Image (tube, rainbow, N blue to C red):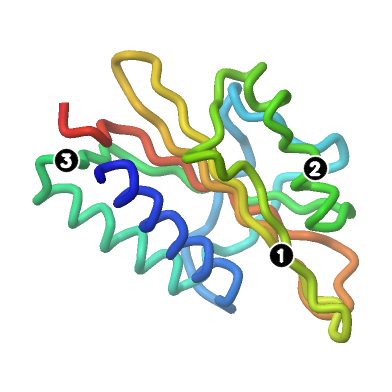
Amino acid sequence: MKRKTVLILVLVLAMAALAACGGGGKSSKSIWPDVPIPPDAKGSDVRLPLPLRLLIQTAMRASASSNDVDVDKFDFVGYTTTQTPQQVADFYSTERMGAAGWQTAEGLGCTTGMDEQSSVGGGFCMFTKDDGGQQSVLFIALANEDNAKETNIFFVRFDGQFSGQ
């Protein structure tokens, strides 16, 4: 039940990231050492979409009042790449992420979709890590706009205790 709550929260965040436009909250240009990035990806000043930022803030507040979830912090990093959302999702294979210490969350891994008529595409990946002392959830949202030659990659990482321990 607890893992499903976290899963539902992250799925809501994924939908918001893919549907959102505009926003605030600048990202950092560096990524965590345990998260691989596609070879041609570059750090970017992409902005965290406003609905996603609001959902994250709500999740952080809710975690403060819950015994089951204690999110110590979250970090956000933005990148862009010339690859399609599908190519980026393929890069984040179970094998590659497993070699970096990540597991697929609830068997999800990555999923993508594309509207063939408008060339708008997106997707998301979700991975978890538990080093015994701290748990992490990594959410990767992929989005490209109509006729865009680049795909935005939004990395959101939550660190804390997600089991109430």
Residue 162 image point, x, y percent: 27, 36
Q: Mark on residue 68?
A: 3
Residue 152 image point, x, y percent: 72, 59
Looking at the rendered structure, the kind of residue marked 1 is Gly
**Residue most toward the bottom?**
117
Q: Which residue is mark 1?
A: 122
Q: Nearer the viewer, residue 76 or 115?
A: 115
Residue 95 image point, x, y percent: 72, 24
Of callouts 3 and 2, the N-terminal one = 3
Quarter of the image where the N terminus is located: top left
Q: Which residue is mark 2?
A: 90
Count residues near mark 3 (Cα–Cα under 10 Å), then give few for <14, some for 14-19, many for 20+: some
Q: Residue at x 29, y 32 (%)?
A: 160
Labelled pair 1, 2 in contact (Cβ < 8 Å): no
At numbered mark 2, what does the secondary structure look like: helix, strand or loop? helix
Image position of 159 (left or right of 72): right
At numbered mark 1, what does the secondary structure look like: helix, strand or loop? strand
Q: Mark on residue 21?
A: none
Looking at the rendered structure, the kind of residue marked 3 is Asp
Q: Residue at x 16, y 33 (%)?
A: 164
Q: Nearer the viewer, residue 107 or 87?
A: 107
Looking at the rendered structure, the kind of residue marked 2 is Asp
19 shown above or below 87 = below
Of callouts 3 and 1, the N-terminal one = 3
61 shown above or below 40 = below
Of callouts 1 and 2, the N-terminal one = 2
How far apart, in angstroms, are the residues tagged by discs 1 and 2? 13 Å
Image position of 162 (left or right of 137): left
How far apart, in angstroms, are the residues tagged by discs 3 and 1? 31 Å
Q: Quarter-wise, where is residue 75 in the image?
A: top left
Count residues near mark 1 (Cα–Cα under 10 Å), then give few for <14, some for 14-19, many for 20+: many
At numbered mark 3, what does the secondary structure look like: helix, strand or loop? loop
